[in-house]
Amino acid sequence: MKAAVKPGLKPATPKVWAMLRKLEALAERGVDGEKLAAQGKVDRLKARFDFSVAAPAETPDLFHGTFKRSSKARRIFSFPNAEFDVANSVKWAIESATGLRCLHRDRDLLAEASVSTATRLAGIAQHIAQSFRALIAQFNVVDGVSLADRGVFVMGLYDGMMNDLRDMGQRLPGRPGFRAKGRTKKPAPSPATGVHFHPYTLGVTLGRQIRFSVPLEEITAELQGLTQQRLTSASAVSDQQGVGKSSRTGKHDSTVPAHAKKVGNR
């Protein structure tokens, strides 16, 4: 029996429906405390809005429809030299989703596509590149992120966007500077000790939304919320550990900031 809707609730707008879908997905597939936090937000959202009316249609897949091949390679986008990882992500995404061959020529990305398809691919390439750029720029300023972490984050964005997720139990990509226990007596030095989440997992969470054209401001806001939540949680755990140590030894090490604690692979 369907639960009665509370009177006086605002009807859910398409934007609110999109938020509900994202939160429900996070509540189902999130890691650590993400599931519980997402479910709490789902409950609060349903307490504020009326979802009894049918949900609006899903935002179309970025690669929906057909793509026409051509023997001629046409330019669809240009990239700065420093963005080789973004350029490759766009190239691989188009090739994987459409079956069309792409190639780099100097700083241009070309696709063997008809004129109309090349025009559409230009818009897709721009959408992916702009999304990756904005998310990478925001990720780079998170406390403790190293240059090497960027590659793992971009890998997660790509896999999430292409729904090329790792199988259950499959090891996540190694984070630079971290080594498995027992392989070395001394921990490998790492400038990324402040990152209390795995960059790949974070990228996957955001990447799928790129493919379904979720507004970029919503995705960047989610990135900010996730990183802040993880860093705050890690800081609280570190503080509790410090208090416990103080009660046992009578000393509290205040010289090591919370973001300097190392975390292993997840």
Image (cartoon, rainbow, N blue to C red):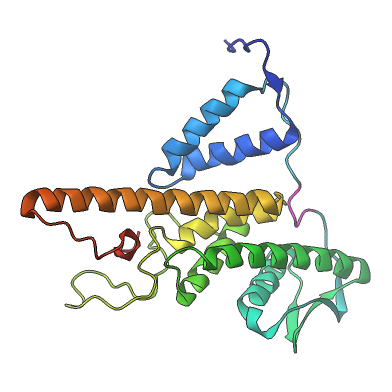
Q: Position of residue 35 (x, y in %)?
A: 44, 40
Left or right, 265 with reference to 110: left
Left or right, 235 with reference to 243: right
- The one nearer the camera, 251 or 185, is 251
Residue beneath the point at 57% across and 49% down:
222
- The one nearer the camera, 108 or 186, is 186
Image-quadrant location for residue 160: bottom right
How many marks on residues?
0
Left or right, 34 with reference to 238: right
Residue beneath the point at 62% across and 54% down:
220
- Asked whether residue 28 is drawn in magenta, I would say no
Left or right, 220 with reference to 142: right
Q: Residue furthest right?
A: 115
* Magenta region: 60-64
The quadrant of the picture occupied by the C terminus is bottom left
Image-quadrant location for residue 158: bottom right
Q: Is residue 252 above or below residue 43?
A: below
- The one nearer the camera, 117 or 37, is 37
Q: Position of residue 247 (x, y in %)?
A: 10, 48
Residue beneath the point at 13% across and 52% down:
246
The quadrant of the picture occupied by the N terminus is top right
Q: Is residue 54 above or below residue 109?
A: above
Main secondary structure type of the part rendered in magenta: loop
Residue beneath the point at 21% across and 51% down:
241
Q: Position of residue 113 (x, y in %)?
A: 85, 73
Q: Is residue 163 visible?
A: no
Q: Position of residue 219 (x, y in %)?
A: 63, 52
Image-quadrant location for residue 24: top right
- Asked whether residue 63 is drawn in magenta, I would say yes
Q: Is residue 41 above or below residue 154?
A: above
